Image (cartoon, grey):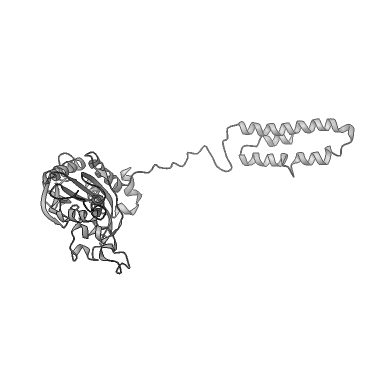
Amino acid sequence: AQVRAEAATLTTAEAQENFRLHWLGRKQGRLKLISEAWLKSAPAEARKPLGIRFNQLKQQIEQALEVQAGAPKTAVAGIDITLPGLVREPGIEHPLLKAMHEIVAVFHNLGYSTNLGPQVETDFYNFEALNFPPNHPARDTQDTLLVADQQKKPSRDRLLMRTHTSPVQIRTMVAQAPPVRIVIPGKVHRNDAADATHSPIFHQVEGLCVDTNITFSDLKGTLDHAMKALFGSAVKTRFFPSFFPFTEPSADVQISCIFCGGKGCRKCKHSGWIELLGCGMVDPAVFAAVTSERRKTDPADDAYNPEKISGFAFGMGVERIAMIQHGISDIGHFYSGDMRFLEQFA
Ligand code: PHE
């Protein structure tokens, strides 16, 4: 009768376990005690009927447990499993990486492949091979984050945080003969104070194309296509003379303002145009630096002879592009981890 009464209350796993221990426990279980106190000391003639009843009781207990195990559980040790579960939201791609992947994809579709390089770079790759003169202002510690204790090394081996993705142009050409068509996405570092449009760490996508007969028209056509792919086919581009030590001629690329369609608004300072990236034809001095590196392993190397090949390069800031695409006014949102910002891109 006691087993029957208890069996009716076994609604939780905890209750079942207590019931099992109470009756079947190896050391202190009721059955064990019954067997020791009564069965073993029973007079011979009582043993058989007692044994039968003992086995019936044991079966009854085991049955009660089996029934419970087979029954659907509606409650588990203090947890109401009929409550709705905690939903784990699927993650989304961060808007910055999403923009970076979009840019890269535009160039993959044109046959470019991706190259990556180190964020801790040498002076040689970041500046020297890119034709930055020794006292160029960009080398100033105002702009460049230098690795400590490098003074004993020759200038070209001194470590710094790369200030742009352009050093990977050099690394690629040293390693590989033309034709070259690569994009280089990655983090870059500058000693800039953080404000609404600046961050000491930001992202660039670089591009490099070197082959026979590459002209400035190829550069213009490629970037015009890329801007239309990124901002819509109505977007126009225009090229302004500019300067970079590693391209000649150099240009800044502007797109017609995507907020006002080029009519002029606050976002484009009423000019109708937004400046977006830098580009130019690879400077022969860069090919010369690449060639002298390549000749360290093959003295006869002539793959980057500017009489035979030419190329263009471009570089763009990913944050800036993502901010324009989505109308984001503060670069800090990208790094805040604020869910209210991130959830807008889900
Ligand atoms: N590296 C330049 C910068 O960071 C951008 C650039 C890349 C310009 C390639 C021309 C060619 O400003």
User: Percent position (x, y) of residue 207?
Assistant: 21, 48
Query: Residue 100 vs residue 42: left or right?
Result: left
Q: Is residue 330 above or below residue 24?
A: below
The residue sitting at 57% across, 40% down in the picture is: 76
User: Where's the N terminus, which quadrant?
Assistant: top right
Ligand 1: image quarter: bottom left
User: Percent position (x, y) of residue 15?
Assistant: 64, 40
How many numbered tags mark residues here? 0
User: Where's the C terminus, which quadrant?
Assistant: top left
Give the quadrant of residue 262.
top left
The residue lying furthest to the front in this view is: 300
Query: Residue 87 vs residue 134: left or right?
Result: right
Q: Nearer the viewer, residue 209 or 252?
A: 209
Q: Is residue 128 visible?
A: yes
Query: Residue 294 vs residue 77: left or right?
Result: left
Q: Is residue 138 above or below residue 235?
A: below
Q: Nearer the viewer, residue 6 or 305?
A: 305
Q: Is residue 166 visible?
A: no
User: Percent position (x, y) of residue 260?
Assistant: 14, 45
Q: Is residue 317 above or below residue 81?
A: below
User: Percent position (x, y) of residue 39?
Assistant: 83, 37
The residue sitting at 16% across, 48% down in the picture is: 312
The residue sitting at 76% across, 38% down in the picture is: 31
Give the quadrant of residue 93.
top left
